[in-house]
Image (cartoon, grey):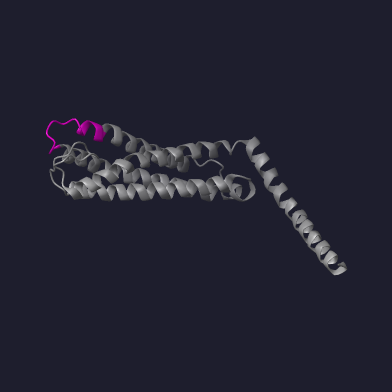
């Protein structure tokens, strides 16, 4: 079996890059630019239209990333079992991915609610003004947090992925496998010490 998985890595990295970059550009570019429109009733519809055009691309990027991530996990499963630290980082990466997916999905749900709100007057895309309806203002306040949470989580995924790439260097693989083997060899010794201590305590109790 080939040790190269260029297609999987490309899907993983390009998908994550689009997910991270799109969310950051949207928060800074789309939302920021729409907030500068003079007519306060047109700010939300224009931003919503831009996000709607990006949604299919973002969904494809996320799908590509997930497919690549699952494929990489399958091909790297021997290292997860034999190299110390790989399993732990895989768990961290999985948790970040699940969190980013949940936040992205919820953010899109709120975005759809804002799309259906029509043309309410707003201060910014995530900032209501005194004329903004209460339900719209509530969605905006939640979106204000979520718009930065998505790039934070996906950015953390980029960092974790880089770290896991370092773990694939030959020296790291060798040291990780030695560490895992050493841990497995020390386990019986530790259990033996615990058993010996238990026996000694029982003897002392009987002698007393």
Residue 25, x across and y down, in percent: 31, 33
Question: Does residue 19 appear in the picture of this structure?
Answer: no
Left or right, residue 57 beside residue 178? left
Exactly how many numbered labels are in the figure?
A: 0
- Residue 141 sits inside the magenta stretch: no
Residue positioned most to the right = 207
* Residue 145, image quadrant: top left
Q: Nearer the viewer, residue 205 or 44?
A: 205
* Residue 47, image quadrant: top left
Q: Nearer the viewer, residue 3 or 172?
A: 172
Left or right, residue 21 beside residue 72? left
* Residue 40, image quadrant: top left
Residue at the spot 37% in from the left edge and 42% down from the top edge: 149
Left or right, residue 68 beside residue 124? right
Residue 72, x across and y down, in percent: 50, 46
Question: Does residue 23 appear in the picture of this structure?
Answer: yes
State which quarter of the image contains the C terminus.
bottom right
State whether the magenta stretch is mostly helix, strand or loop: loop
Q: Which residues are magenta?
A: 30-42
Residue 167, x across and y down, in percent: 58, 39
Left or right, residue 199 beside residue 1? right
Residue 176, x across and y down, in percent: 65, 42
Residue positioned most to the bottom = 206
Residue at the spot 50% in from the left edge and 42% down from the top edge: 5
Residue at the spot 51% in from the left edge and 36% down from the top edge: 162
Residue at the spot 24% in from the left edge and 47% down from the top edge: 139
Residue positioned most to the front = 208
């Amino acid at each position: 079996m080939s040790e190269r998985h260029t297609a999987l890595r490309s899907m993983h990295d390009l998908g994550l890059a689009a997910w991270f970059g799109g969310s950051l550009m949207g928060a800074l570019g789309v939302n920021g630019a729409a907030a500068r429109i003079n007519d306060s009733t047109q700010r939300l519809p224009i931003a919503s239209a831009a996000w709607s055009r990006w949604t299919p691309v973002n969904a494809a990027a996320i799908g590509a990333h997930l497919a690549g991530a699952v494929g990489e996990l399958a091909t790297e499963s021997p290292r997860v079992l034999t190299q110390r630290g790989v399993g732990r980082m895989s768990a961290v990466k999985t948790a970040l991915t699940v969190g980013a997916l949940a936040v992205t999905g919820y953010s899109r749900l709120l975005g759809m609610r804002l799309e259906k709100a029509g043309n309410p007057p707003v201060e910014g895309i995530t900032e209501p003004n005194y004329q903004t309806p209460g339900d719209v203002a509530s969605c905006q306040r939640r979106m204000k947090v979520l718009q930065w949470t998505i790039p934070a989580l996906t950015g953390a995924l980029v960092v974790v992925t880089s770290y896991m790439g370092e773990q694939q260097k030959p020296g790291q693989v060798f040291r990780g496998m030695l560490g895992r083997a050493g841990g497995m060899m020390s386990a019986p010794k530790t259990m033996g010490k615990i058993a010996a201590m238990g026996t000694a305590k029982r003897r002392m109790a009987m002698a007393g």
